[in-house]
Amino acid sequence: MSTATRTYRGSSLEEILPRIRAELGPDAVITRRREGLTGGVGGFFQKQFVEVEAHAGAPRFEAIDDSDAVPDSFRSTVDSPQSTERAPAIEKILEQAAPFADQLSTALERTAPAPGTAMAPLVAGRRAPAEAREIVEDLVEAGLHPVLAEGVVTETVSHVLPFSPHSSLERLVRETLARRIPVQSTWTRQGRTIGFVGPGGSGKTLCTARLAATYATGSDLPVICLTLRPRDGGAELKSLLHPYGVPVHPVDDPGEARARIAGAREHALIVIDTPTVSPAEPAEHDRLAADLEAIGVYEIHLTLPATVGAHAADDVLRGFADLGVSRIVLTHADETGHVGPAVGLAIRSGRPFSYISSGTSVDGGLLPVNPHALASIIVA
Ligand SMILES: Nc1nc2c(ncn2[C@@H]2O[C@H](COP(=O)(O)OP(=O)(O)OP(=O)(O)O)[C@@H](O)[C@H]2O)c(=O)[nH]1
Ligand SMILES: [Mg+2]
């Protein structure tokens, strides 16, 4: 039998030892054992491997050397007291293969440092907690893009967990995600001029009514409500706002709109409902863009239904971006818990969320976005 040294690599000793015994026989000599991490994404979620060097034949135990160059991601665990603990499967193998077992025992003892002389690990640091993988899967399940999900959990494990080692990982991931969600619901000036744009049925008219009603009942600012070229002459918006005493002014062009709001911009809440423009009708789209610019609408909020998938969310923003969209209103939020695509869009695009809309009543259906509440929809 050859005494050439062979290297065996597997995910555990239990997996490797039977192979060694089968190939090198019961007299096989273990000359080296080490453990490390391999693969993974960005140095994270790597798989653990065990590597054993062995040769067949008479005992020829050689110096154990773990000091040679190893990859950065390698983490030697031979200094760890646990490294000599054996799983039941190993114990079973040991019982069944006496000479081999003796050599293995010797090898394991020789690879473990004497008490009090532990080697420094080659790379210090903890492993990612096992539940990290499950949380990534939960985030993806909630509709977050896998790269974003992995990034949020990686950031939490590497940079947040060290400061709160006793906190639940889920809670910390939720906080990390919340910190990444851009939010801006107010304007530094006292007066605001706001327009809602978005796909058909996404909630433009209801958001206009809700914002106008909220300010009319609770703010010290006067409210001016316009609706640009409404198909129904403004009937729907008028009926929604009638109980709040807010008049609705249908306008056909920017000149008419400017005349309505002249002198009020600095001290009023001016809110404008816009008509749906189809991407299939670029002339209408360009006309709306030109009108919003001519009126001087400083804040253009895109009404984005929470029910959109990732691709559709991208398409919606791309389709409306040139209208000057600066905020995103998350609408129809009561209809799904699957808000990942919309949240991912805000994070990726840097467009902040302003409001979140749910239900169909005017009262209380529109609230400034709280990023922590939004994150908790994704990480329960
Ligand atoms: N459940 C729920 N329904 C909503 C929400 N927002 C709007 N709706 C309903 O969705 C429908 C369309 O809402 P609108 O506000 O008219 O949408 P729009 O964007 O103005 O629609 P068009 O002007 O026709 O393009 C109405 O029946 C609303 O009551 C919401 O947040 N949740
Ligand atoms: Mg409408």
Image (spheres, rainbow, N blue to C red):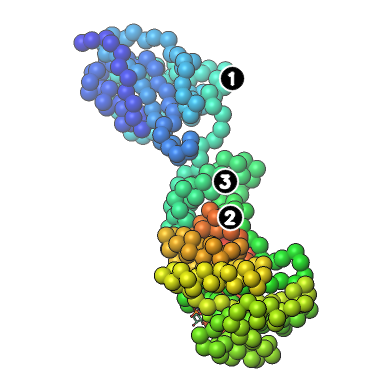
Q: Which of 224 and 359 is in front in this view?
A: 224
Q: Position of residue 154 (x, y in %)?
A: 53, 43
Q: Is mark 2 on a helix, strand or loop?
A: loop
Which of the two discs, 2 and 1, sits closer to the camera?
2
Ligand 1 within 8 angstroms of badge 2 C-beta: no
Few, some or many residues within 10 Å of mark 1 (<14, 14–19, 20+): few
Say if mark 1 contacts mark 3, CB within 8 Å.
no
Q: Name the residue under label 1.
A: 116
Q: Which of 356 and 326 is in front in this view?
A: 326
205 in relation to 63, above or below = below
Q: Name the residue under label 2.
A: 350
Q: In this view, does 11 lie above or below 151?
A: above
Looking at the image, which residue is at 26% across and 26% down? 19
User: Can residue 236 be seen in this snapshot?
Assistant: yes
Q: Residue 156 carries which label?
A: 3
From the viewer's perspective, tell me whether residue 344 is left or right of residue 257: left
Q: Which callout, 1 or 3, points to the residue nearer the camera?
A: 3
Residue occupying the point 47% across, 71% down: 283
Q: Residue 206 carries which label?
A: none
Type of amino acid at the residue the image marks with label 2: Gly
Binning the other alpha carbons within 10 Å of mark 2 as few (below 14), some (14 to 19) or many (20 upward) gives some
Distance CA(mark 2)–CA(mark 3): 20 Å
Amino acid beneath label 3:
Thr
Q: In which quarter of the image is residue 17?
A: top left
Quote the CA–CA distance across marks 2 and 1: 53 Å
| Element type where label 1 sits in the image | loop
Q: In this view, does 292 lie to the left or right of 16?
A: right
Left or right: 136 as drawn, with respect to 207: left
